[in-house]
């Protein structure tokens, strides 16, 4: 491994800052109407977003300058704390219900989502665990099943909230680490079939999830119910055309698209900035993922490589799912667009994780 500490990857840093700046602008535009209607302040959401962005940038500065191998010491403790928080949030009277999910800890409008912490906590622990020289992940029973059991336990706790979106991102990023660590394809393939059956069971077990699937296939079958969000999102994207209606000129943010500053912020962005604006955002994410994977491939330390893969995977999967939902290519699930959507703990944790990735890039070849 390159022992000389270098400057962080400049392309990676510029993409993070660029996406964050676009996010703050779009949160103000997309959330101004809802902020004025609900709180009497059209700047309500952007002020809070700027606050969390400041906290996140401070955390990113710390983690970008803290040797990533520091996390080897605290990965296990961090995961235990994440599990405790996930259990606490399920206890009535302690966990708060928002948007139909018991996924928050906190007071009033200030709170944290333990599932967001679990995404990073699981990535850190798996990277440490699977990078040990004596760990043989090619063994099915002793190598592959233990980490999958751990991932499955965390996923089950997240689903009890329920929060399929966050759980899917954590599960997907974790599987990327397991695959990169050297798990056999035939083992993963067999478990994948079991996973598909289990996923189908989760959908059938909750009527609202089944409605989302049917709405995804034909949103017009229930235009005022399960299909409403997809239809309104497409109504926003369509008129945007090539150059958009202009910043701040969205029509769908006037109580048509539900919570336009969070999960469906990309539809408002496409409406106001058009195809060109949407492609710029996607290009920035693509560069971020490319530079992150380049870091993972050029650092010789196994822990650093697996950690980089997990962080990049977390970003990439979240982007794919969010935009897939917004353009009607995936069933609706509650998940934010990294660095763009309004959010407190999600934004802060994402910037913290990207700071770790920036630090890994300082030691890459």
Image (cartoon, rainbow, N blue to C red):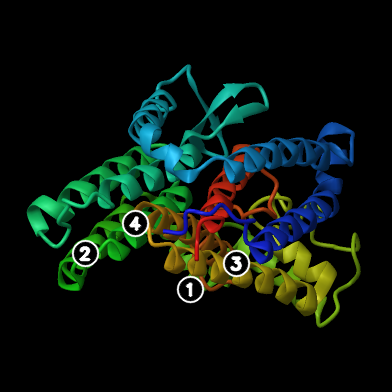
Say above or below: 245 vs 143. below
Question: Which residue of the protein is positioned furthest toward the bottom in this rendering?
Answer: 242
Check contact, mark 2 vs mark 3: CB within 8 A: no
Which mark, by number, is residue 217? 1
Mark 3 secondary-structure assignment: helix
**Residue 162 in view, yes or no:** no
Q: Nearer the viewer, residue 356 or 94?
A: 356
Q: CA distance from mark 2 to mark 3?
A: 29 Å
Which of discs 1 and 2 lies nearer the camera? The answer is 2
Q: Residue at x 42, y 27 (%)?
A: 85
Tell me where residue 28 appears, x and y as whole percent.
84, 49
Q: CA distance from mark 1 to mark 2?
A: 34 Å
Say above or below: 230 vs 64. below
Q: Mark 2: give few (<14), some (14-19) or many (20+) Cα within 10 Å.
A: many
Tell me where residue 23 appears, x and y as whole percent.
75, 54
Q: Nearer the viewer, residue 148 or 155?
A: 148
Q: Earlier in the sequence, mark 4 or mark 3?
A: 4
Q: Earlier in the sequence, mark 4 or mark 1?
A: 1
Which of discs 2 and 3 lies nearer the camera? The answer is 2
Horizontal relation, residue 192 to residue 42: left or right: left
**Residue 101 in view, yes or no:** yes
Which mark, by number, is residue 183? 2
Q: CA distance from mark 3 to mark 1?
A: 16 Å
Check contact, mark 4 vs mark 3: CB within 8 A: no
Mark 4 = which residue? 302
Which mark, by number, is residue 323? 3
Which of discs 4 and 2 lies nearer the camera? The answer is 4
Which of discs 4 and 3 lies nearer the camera? The answer is 4
């Amino acid at each position: 491994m390159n022992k000389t500490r270098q400057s962080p990857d400049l392309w990676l840093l510029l993409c993070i800052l660029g996406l964050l700046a676009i996010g703050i602008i779009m949160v103000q535009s997309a959330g101004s109407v809802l902020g004025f209607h609900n709180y009497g302040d059209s700047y309500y959401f952007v002020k809070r977003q700027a606050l969390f962005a400041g906290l996140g940038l401070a955390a990113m500065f710390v983690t970008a300058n803290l040797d990533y191998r520091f996390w080897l010491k605290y990965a296990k403790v961090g995961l235990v704390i994440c599990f405790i928080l996930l259990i606490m949030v399920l206890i009535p009277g302690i966990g708060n219900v928002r948007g139909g999910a018991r996924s928050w800890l906190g007071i009033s409008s200030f709170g944290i989502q333990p599932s967001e912490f679990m995404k990073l906590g699981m990535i850190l622990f798996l990277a440490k665990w699977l990078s040990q020289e004596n760990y043989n992940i090619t063994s099915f029973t002793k190598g592959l099943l233990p980490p999958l059991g751990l991932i499955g336990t965390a996923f089950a706790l997240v689903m009890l909230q329920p929060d399929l979106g966050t759980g899917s991102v954590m599960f997907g990023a974790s599987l990327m680490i397991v695959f990169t660590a050297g798990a056999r394809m035939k083992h993963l393939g067999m478990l994948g079939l079991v996973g598909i059956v289990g996923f189908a069971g989760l959908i059938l077990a909750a009527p609202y999830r089944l409605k989302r699937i049917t709405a995804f296939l034909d949103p017009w079958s229930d235009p005022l119910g399960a299909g409403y969000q997809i239809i309104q999102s497409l109504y926003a994207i369509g008129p945007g055309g090539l150059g958009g209606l202009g910043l701040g000129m969205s029509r769908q943010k006037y109580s048509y698209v539900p919570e336009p500053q969070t999960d469906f912020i990309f539809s408002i962005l496409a409406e106001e900035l058009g195809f060109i604006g949407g492609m710029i955002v996607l290009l920035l994410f693509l560069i971020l993922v490319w530079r992150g994977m380049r870091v993972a491939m050029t650092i010789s330390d196994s822990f650093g490589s697996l950690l980089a893969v997990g962080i990049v995977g977390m970003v990439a999967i979240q982007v794919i799912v969010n935009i897939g939902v917004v353009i009607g290519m995936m069933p609706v699930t509650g998940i934010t667009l990294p660095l763009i959507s309004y959010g407190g703990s999600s934004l802060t944790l994402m910037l913290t994780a990207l700071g770790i990735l920036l630090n890994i890039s300082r030691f890459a070849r």
